[in-house]
């Protein structure tokens, strides 16, 4: 643009000089002026062409700059999108971390509860073992009670027999002699053995020791109860 303005100024200056120097210009002057104008016109055309080429170059540069700006805008948008995705990924990882911590805390609580249950299970197993031992002792006690019940029944049977034998029999003549001495004599004469009661002995223990019935042992010795004393002599019936 500066070159075009200078060209116009030179052209007008030339015309003014031609018009001012000769009042009636000749043909030669006009030809010179025309040639100068043509030269100036050609120069102006070349200048215009240069300016157009320069303008086209500037337009191309502007287009390239705009394309670069568009590319940069695209890269910026892509970077922003990636940044947003990265932020969302970080937030997702934070949420996953929070869930992982919650799961870890819940697992810790479950582990503690399981340990408590294992301790309770061990205590229950111990109680079951003790209950099993108590059950065994209870069964043994039941067996002992059953055995004692049988022995008590035998003792009651023996006492009933003794009470029946102790009743006097009716007789027309003199009173009959007691039956117990006779039984004792028969037992002694039939080869029965005798034992001496020692401290700690019981009638039931002696009956079991010598394998005789408790009722027979009480009947042979005319006993109305199972009470015996140390030093007492007892007759053993035949087994």
Image (spheres, rainbow, N blue to C red):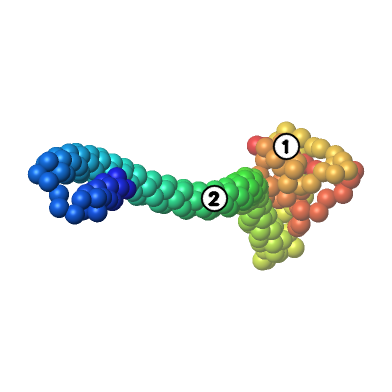
Residue 160 makes an appearance in the image: yes
Is 134 displayed left or right of 55 in the figure?
A: right
Q: Earlier in the sequence, mark 2 or mark 1?
A: 2
Q: Nearer the viewer, residue 11 or 171?
A: 11
Q: How many marks?
A: 2
Is 24 displayed left or right of 94 in the figure?
A: left
Residue 62 makes an appearance in the image: no
Between the C-alphas of marks 2 and 1, the distance is 77 Å
Q: Which quadrant of the structure image shows residue 133?
A: top right
Which mark identifies residue 78?
none
Q: Which residue is mark 1?
A: 209
Q: Reply above or below: 42 against 20.
A: above
Q: Reply above or below: 12 against 28.
A: below
Specify the quadrant that holds the C terminus: top right
Q: Nearer the viewer, residue 211 or 70?
A: 70
- Residue extending farthest to the left is 27
Residue 20 in picture, x, y percent from top left: 24, 54
Q: Nearer the viewer, residue 73 or 66?
A: 66
Q: Which quadrant of the structure image shows residue 58?
A: top left
Q: Nearer the viewer, residue 237 or 142?
A: 142
Residue 148 in picture, x, y percent from top left: 66, 52
SS for tag 1?
helix
Look at 44% across and 50% down and name the residue there.
87
Look at 37% across and 47% down and name the residue there.
76
Look at 57% across and 52% down and name the residue there.
105
Residue 18 in picture, x, y percent from top left: 22, 49
Q: Which residue is mark 2?
A: 101
Whether label 2 touches label 1, CB < 8 Å: no
SS for tag 2?
helix
Look at 69% across and 62% down and name the residue there.
163
């Amino acid at each position: 643009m500066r070159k075009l303005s200078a060209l116009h100024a030179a052209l007008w200056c030339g015309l003014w000089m031609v018009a001012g120097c000769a009042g009636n210009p000749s043909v030669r002057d006009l030809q010179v002026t025309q040639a100068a104008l043509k030269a100036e016109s050609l120069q102006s055309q070349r200048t215009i062409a240069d300016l157009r080429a320069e303008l086209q170059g500037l337009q191309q540069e502007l287009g390239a700059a705009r394309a670069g700006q568009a590319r940069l805008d695209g890269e910026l948008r892509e970077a922003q999108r990636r940044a947003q995705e990265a932020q969302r990924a970080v937030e997702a990882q934070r949420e996953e971390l929070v869930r992982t911590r919650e799961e870890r805390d819940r697992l810790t609580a479950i582990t503690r509860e399981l340990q408590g249950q294992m301790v309770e299970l061990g205590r229950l197993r111990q109680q079951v073992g003790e209950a099993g031992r108590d059950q065994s002792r209870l069964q043994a006690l039941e067996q002992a009670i059953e055995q004692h019940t049988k022995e008590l029944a035998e003792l009651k049977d023996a006492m009933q027999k003794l009470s029946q034998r102790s009743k006097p029999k009716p007789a027309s003549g003199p009173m009959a002699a007691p039956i117990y001495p006779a039984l004792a004599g028969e037992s002694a004469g039939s080869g029965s053995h005798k034992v001496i009661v020692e401290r700690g002995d019981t009638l039931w223990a002696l009956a079991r020791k010598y394998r005789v019935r408790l009722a027979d042992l009480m009947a042979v010795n005319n006993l109305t109860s199972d009470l015996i004393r140390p030093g007492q002599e007892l007759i053993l019936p035949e087994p």
